[in-house]
Amino acid sequence: MKGGKVFLDTNILIYAHDTSAGKKHELARNIVLELWESGEGVLSTQVLQEFFVSVTKKIPKPLDVKLAKEIVNNLLKWDVVINNGESILEAIEIHIQHKYSFWDSMIIEAAIRGNTTLLLSEDLSDGQIINGVKIKNPFLEHQT
């Protein structure tokens, strides 16, 4: 992942903390650790919000709310893109042009605003480049 800032979609963060996710947990955890050490990780307020809700309510073994808050607090040390009115309008343009859902378009727009070169996500089109940001599914090459 060397060569620029990397934006993580919510699912990567969730897998990194969901011990029931098997191989995805290990891979996502390694990605987060690598980005932590390199200082190249970028998130958005949306990702942090979705992460908190998912790890405290939606995964098979939910995290304690206080632990999840501590994780979010630590992640705030990364570059965090704050969504604003302009980013909403730009996300709508991405939605129109690329046919992603509005929420996925917000993720893509945040990656663009965060000056990243790579967006890691399980949910978006692997290999697609939007406004200079390449989308990559880190789990594809590790599937059996």
Image (tube, grey):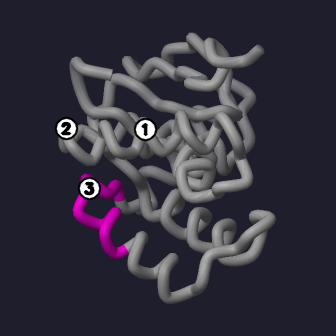
The quadrant in which residue 52 appears is bottom right
The quadrant in which residue 107 appears is top right
* Res. 20 mark: none
Residue at (49, 64) in percent of width and height = 48
| Position above or below: 34 against 87 | above
Q: Count residues near mark 2 (Cα–Cα under 10 Å), then give few for <14, some for 14-19, many for 20+.
A: few
Name which of mark 1 and mark 2 comes first in the sequence.
Answer: 1
Task: Look at the image and say whether residue 74 sits in the magenta stretch.
Answer: yes
How far across and how far down the image is residue 32, in percent?
40, 44
Q: Is residue 6 left or right of 49 when viewed as pictured?
A: left
- Range of magenta residues: 73-81
Q: Which structural element holds mark 2?
A: helix
How far across and how far down the image is residue 57, in percent?
74, 76
Q: Which residue is mark 1?
A: 30
Q: Count residues near mark 3 (Cα–Cα under 10 Å), then give few for <14, some for 14-19, many for 20+.
A: some
Q: Are marks 1 and 2 in contact (CB under 8 Å)?
A: no
Q: Give the amino acid type for the residue marked by disc 2 in the picture.
A: Ser
Q: Is residue 1 left or right of 51 when viewed as pictured?
A: left
Q: Nearer the viewer, residue 84 or 56?
A: 56
Q: Which structural element holds mark 3?
A: loop
The quadrant in which residue 72 appears is bottom left
How far across and how far down the image is residue 117, in percent?
33, 23
Name which of mark 3 and mark 1 comes first in the sequence.
Answer: 1
Q: Which residue is mark 2?
A: 38
